[in-house]
Amino acid sequence: MAVATHLTWMQEKKLQNYFGEKQFSLLYKASVHGFSTNSLLQICSRQGPTLTVIYSKDRIVVAYMHKNYGEGNYLITVFVFQETTTTECKVGPFKLLMSFDKDPGGNLEVSMHLKEKTMYFSVKAKKTLGLLQNYISFQDCEVFRCEDLLDERRMNGITVLKESLLCAIRSYIPYGGLVHKIRILLLGPVGAGKSSFFNSVRSIFRGHVTNQALVGSNPTGTSEKYRAYFIKDGKDNNTLPFILCDSMGLSEKEGLDMDDIPYILEGHFPDRYQFNSLKPRPKGIGNHTGCPLLKDRIHCVAFVFNANSVGELSHEMVEKIKKIQRELIKSDVVHVVLLTHVDTLDLITKGDLIDIYKCVPVKLKLEAVHRKLGFALSDIFVVSNYTSEWELEPVIDVLILSALKEMLWAADDFLENLPLEKTGACQEVHEYANSGESGTILALYVINKNCL
């Protein structure tokens, strides 16, 4: 049976950050293994540095031991966590077993008697730790093994996972072979991180940090053109099986025109199209007039939001996003959410990115997006873009690649759900037009109607 700690996520997080991004593995719990010094030493010996946590009614006392339980003299760092304050003192050196002796007289700086569930402090330790009396009665005691959060074993596992994701994306073939490349449209408020996400994806596949798409702090955004970015794999220089499409950011007054969105979804806008409200919209791409091919359409939309500000979206912006959602549902286009800048949320560190979806601040953000914008929790993914880093980080890469893989799978759902007549109708138009056979005009009329 798994043994759970009394520590809340917030308490554990504060301890991890205090000790420099450590992970804690619960070894001993007195209420389960017994309030016995022998039991504690038998379970916790030769485990490396440990953290002993004492739970009293109104505070937590933490004792950090820098080396194995065993023989020798010990220096111990003691912390007292109260509701609003944290105090600390270093005690020792002394023999380990002495610290488990009953010491009501305060001859030792700190000692703990498990059987009586009492911890004793000398006058000096009591004063340093800000305690009102020289003993604390406690309800439970836990001992944790302390390890680096990003130790070699974990980093090796992350590297293996990254390579697995790279392999899956490189070998990906869109559903039914209906198109050669999936088109993913990035939509979101100005400054949310759309262009940075493209740069991050490109960086991973190129093997170094790159910045092809312009990124800046312009309040109106830096993307004024519609861009369809092809990405070449640095491994073999082949073009990858997806295209990331970037557009102007959404804003309350300026930004992307809502009337442009259906045209983007249908594939009417060519790469590098300059958005201009005074300029007539194009009727097609290249040689296609009014009926773009399936390969030109958007197959998946990713809404991009800054995790730090998504909860502060204005009423106008929320209504705009919901209007786009209705258009996507009308067009049967699948859509997901990317929450960027997750690494800058309060209390989140690089080590948390390994298991980011279990972090309380992230869970709260996902639930907030679900409540405010109506997106399913299973369709919301968190990423950390490359914005100031000089080198690639495998932990960041795994988050980005995992989200990208989910977008490709979502695009497969769109292709699989297409009515049969829409999977190749436009192609048939051109074949009929070039055949010179009778009935061409009728065929053009019927099939073009299906493409609308």
Image (cartoon, grey):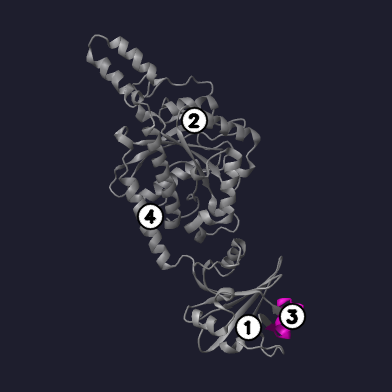
On screen, residue 376 above or below 392: above
Q: Position of residue 105 (x, y in %)?
A: 72, 90
Q: Which residues are magenta?
A: 120-135
Numbered badge on residue 127:
3
Question: For the residue carrying disc 2, how many other residues have a C-alpha within 10 Å: few (<14), some (14-19), or many (20+)?
Answer: few
Magenta highlight on residue 123: yes
Residue at image position (34%, 53%) is: 164
Callout 3 touching callout 2 (CB < 8 Å): no
Q: Which residue is mark 2?
A: 329
Q: Could you tell which of marks 1 and 3 lies nearer the N-terminus?
A: 1
What residue appears at the point 60 percent right and 89 percent down from the top-left corner? 98
Where, by quadrant of the figure, is residue 414 drawn? Answer: top left
Q: Nearer the viewer, mark 3 or mark 2?
A: 2
Disc 2, SS: helix
Q: Is the residue 296 above or below the residue 210 in the image?
A: above
**Residue bearing the label numbered 4:** 162
Residue 95 visible in the picture:
no
